[in-house]
Image (spheres, helix red, strand yellow):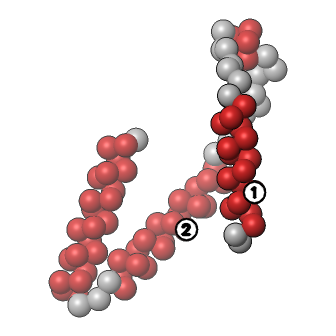
Amino acid sequence: MYAAHMIGTSAAAYGAGYSRSVLQTYLPAFYAAGAQCLVAASLVWLIERRRAPSSLSSRGVKWRQAPSSLVKFCQALSRLSLTRL
């Protein structure tokens, strides 16, 4: 997945540079990026939902509880983010 992301990023950068060199504008690159975002957003609807198993511990999955200091930090960060909107 990481390699595919890097290949796509390099192709987009090359395409934007080519567009700038040939057409003297980045506009086609922005339109292509917007179209790809719309396609990706529409493909999300094809993902099927799966129900989580009722008991993950029966499958050998062990969950650890996050340290309370981390939980408090995340809660404070979310409150700060919401008040800055």
| Residue 8 image offset from top left, x and y in percent | 33, 56
Contact, mark 2 vs mark 1 (Cβ under 8 Å): no
What amino acid is found at the position of numbered circle 1 in the picture?
A: Arg
- Residue at horizontal 35%, vertical 77%? 29
Q: Which residue is mark 1?
A: 79
- 39, above or below 51, in the image: below
Q: Residue lying furthest front in this view?
A: 69
Decide if residue 60 is on the left or right side of residue 39: right
**24 versus 84 height, above or below:** below
Quarter of the image with the C terminus in it: bottom right
- Mark positioned earlier in the residue sequence (2 or 1): 2
Mark 2: few, some, or many residues within 10 Å (few <14, many ≥20)? few
In the rendered image, the quadrant that contains the N terminus is: top left
Query: Which label sits on residue 18?
Result: none
Q: Is residue 31 above or below residue 55?
A: below
Q: Residue 23 location, x and y as percent?
A: 23, 89
Residue furthest to the right: 54
Q: Secondary structure at mark 2?
A: helix
User: What residue would you read off at disc 2?
Assistant: 38
Q: Is residue 26 left or right of residue 56?
A: left
Along the line of sight, which residue is nearer the eye, 60 or 19?
Answer: 60
Q: Residue 46: x percent and y percent?
A: 63, 50
Identify which amino acid the numbered label 2 is placed on.
Leu
